[in-house]
Amino acid sequence: MLKWLVLIPALLATVVGDVPLDSNELVTRNDEPLDYRLPEDLDPIHYDVEVTPYFEEAPADKEPFTFDGVVTIAIRAVKDNLNSLIIQENVRDIISVSLSINSTGVPVLLNQTNPFERIRQFFFLRVNLADGVTLENGEVYSLRIVYIGNINETPLSRGVFRGSYRDRNGKLHWYAATHLQPVNSRQAFPSFDEPGFKSTFNIIVNRPAHFGETYSNMRLRESYPEGDRVKEIFHTTPRMSAYLITFHISEEFTVIADNKNYQESYRILARPEAQGQGEYALEVGPPITKWLENYFNISYYSMEEGMKNDQIASPDWASGATENWGLVTYRELRLLYEEGETNSVDKLNIGTITAHELAHKWFGNLITCKWWENVWMNEGFASYFEYFAMDGVDKSLELEDQFILMYLQSSLSSDASANTRALRHTVNSPAQVTGHFSGISYSKGASFLLMLKHFLGEDTFKAALQRFLIDRSYENAIPEDLYRAFAIEVSNSQQVTNVDIEAFMQYWVDEPGYPVLNVDVNTNTGLISLKQERFFISATAEPTDQVWPLPLTFTTSNNTNWNDLTPRHLMTDQTYEIQLEPGLEWVIFNVQQKGIYRVNYDTQNWERLATVLKSDYNNIHHLNRAQIVDDVFALMRSERIPYLLGFRVIDFLKEDTSFYSWYPAISGFNWLRNRFLHLPGTLAQFDDLLYQFLDAVVQDLGYVGQPGERFTRTLNRFHILSFACNIGYPGCLSNATEQYNAFKTANVNVDPNLRRHVFCTGLRQGDYDDWSNMRTRRLNSNNQADEVVMLRALGCTKDERAIREHLENILTEEVKAQDRSNAFTFLYMGSQENANVVLQFFKERFDDIRRAVVLQSSFEGVISNIASYLNEEGLNDMENWLRENQSNIPEYNVGINAIASARNSMQWGTDRAELIISALRGSASVMMLSTTLLIISLMIVMFR
């Protein structure tokens, strides 16, 4: 599953993830008395699952939006003397339970007074046998459960949920779909709802006769009418985990793109109004599948007889997409592309997310982590191949290089706090499980694989993965299974010798955090002295004694080589020395940033890098320029280098126009800028200095795209202009206003790649009518990606009537549940002053907002984000309200902590404002002097 990461306030908003009990929100396998794990004394072999759904027009004896269910599970006992069975369930009601011997059908007697009990706290169903009756070890039994399930109100509750859309005539259409990852198959049917339990499944759906064909993991085997319904029976699935089961029941969803190849079928499914929006997904999907098949040497279509490869676009979906075998489900904007409506960022995401979900067919489906403590074994691999498989299909996207920005640098950011967690991290409750689907599992897991590939060589890396896949196909796996596969292939390799690869991998998997490599260069002797220590973003964090096995690459001014990415040194102690020839001018470690570590040089080496970057930034590889920018901002924040030196190093950004340099720069500048929002004078000075950095890149990119330009140039313009307009860069505001007025008065189309900043600028400067017209345009849109762009723009208004109306709309079906928490954040991002208006609305409609955003974690995010945008007056108001209503607000501590965090951010900015402004202003003059001295010294050498 591709899960979208938590929002970073004021930078970008991202997309997040009614049941009897909400299994996503409960508050740890460990030794504590609270244990949500099943005992491993039963082996589920096969399920028959039959569901009969009821929508709005339900029979008199049925509740609307429920379903009748019957599940029959063939279970083998693997332990002696069992007098009870425990499985997981979180359905509406259990009607009956029976047990029989599978081979003969002979009933097994249950306890007459208490045949089954629902242990709701842990989502357990215990089936109690009669006194003296036990299961025979090795015997297979048939457990049959008749039950009633809920079709939940929104996808955020997962399980079986209802979604909706309106057709061109405004008619509302309901559909039912499943989202069972990670702990929600228990909502669809009582089950062994843990990834380590694998079974085959037969799915049967009794749909309303006027509905269209149901879609599920496998092809439809047979269907026939039964009264006012049609019984649909699907082929048997591969052996797999229960969370991978899926079905989609709707009136009119249809195939909108098809490769017309029955043996290797690849289809795009969607509501009929999305016709024409599936071609790009069809264009990239089959080649990605083929690339993965070749890389792993295992054919997707041979995984099970009659395997299909459907991708379905759901208007309502809790995450980006989910990897159900045979039927991957996506949120619409992550699968559907419409020329002239979808921007390049969303188009790119369609390709990478498709690759992510298809990679899961091998890592996640064919092999599944035994328990969610190792979810990185599913998600880290899928995230890695998300970029490298798509790169294998389309080199023009530069995804091999983009991986460094989007995953490796993201990993460094996510893993720098004192309370981060290791890739393997103990989880128990559903809430803990859901929380482990996080940036660490995705970004650090993927980055670890990249580092491993370059350390061992791609041939060894690929061979180890192929061995692992063969060894554990259709089974669960733990990290040690992976380590063994690598150990065997490393022993056969010539590239790496005398390395305990199992110990190497285990350390990186089991230890939180990562190191910073401190580099001291003696230019006279050529001796490079290295020291590693754990990197913390907080300057006050307690140091640790961790020492990582660190593969090192480097290049120097004397022997520059940007393409040798094979580590020649493995640092296994806290200190290490490398002897080179004397006379070095500069050295750079971590070539093209393939390793998970930051680098901090001695002052002289930083100064020399600053000089060479300023004289000609192209002397340094674009990925190492990106590394330097990202590292410098982190090193300044953690007080490892002074701001004057840091800004001197990145002063080259005033000339460099590369996407790779500017993507981390925007993040770094935004973080600092957000600490000055409460200081208008400081903020104005800071923005003026930022404009000097932006001049060259804005002038180079221009305000409109050019046909045939590099894809990363288009991406760069998208992000640069959004940033520039947001901080008030005059040229950007002027051009955006001009484009918006032409759009408003003459209906001149705005390029989808420019709409984010053009629409926001227009509404920020506009009135209620501007906001109302944009709202109408959004309601009439037939493309979800464009809808989200407009939802963001609606939050940019400063008109109080529009803000109030927008807040009311967020609580209605006008804004899908999956977008509501972001819709609040878009208001703060659009204009900080809006936060105070939202706070008043929040105080008035507290309970309504809680219900609308559905999930407790999302609601807590809304509370925290309000605080992060309020001024001191607003924080005082919020704090007083919380204290006055403490007994009625379960999230009181969340709010108080968010207020304290906001004040700490303000204080941080107040304490450092003068220092940072002075350093930012002074770096340019120092750089001019340094460059002059360099030129003079070169001239002396030339004319000596």
Image: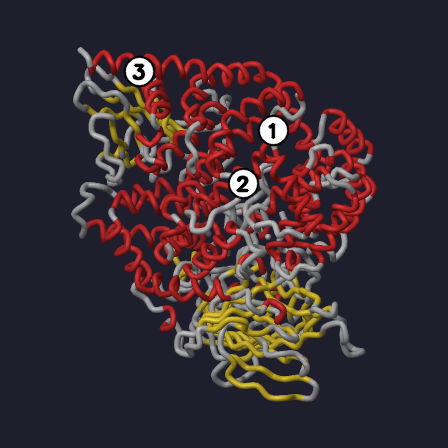
Residue 464, how many percent across, how many down? 28, 55
Closer mark to the observer between disc 3 and disc 2:
2
Circle 2 residues within 10 Å: few <14, some 14–19, many ≥20: some
Relative depth, front residue between 315 and 864: 315
What residue is shown at x 77% (from left), y 51% (from top)? 809
Residue 419, how many percent across, how many down? 51, 34
Which amino acid type is shown beneath numbered disc 2?
Tyr
Residue 534, how many percent across, how many down? 40, 29
Residue 625: give its label.
none
Identify whether 77 is placed above or below 398. below
Relative depth, front residue between 153 and 195: 153
Residue 674: give its label.
1
Precedes in sequence: disc 3 or disc 1: 1
In the visual, does 99 lie left or right of 384?
Answer: right
**Residue under numbered circle 2:** 703
Residue 232, how many percent across, how many down? 58, 82
| Residue 261 in sight | yes
Precedes in sequence: disc 3 or disc 2: 2
**Residue under numbered circle 3:** 934
What residue is shown at x 57% (from left), y 39% (from top)? 722
Classify mark 2: helix, strand or loop. loop
| Residue 98 in sight | no
Classify mark 1: helix, strand or loop. helix
Which amino acid type is shown beneath numbered disc 1?
Asn
Closer mark to the observer between disc 3 and disc 1:
3
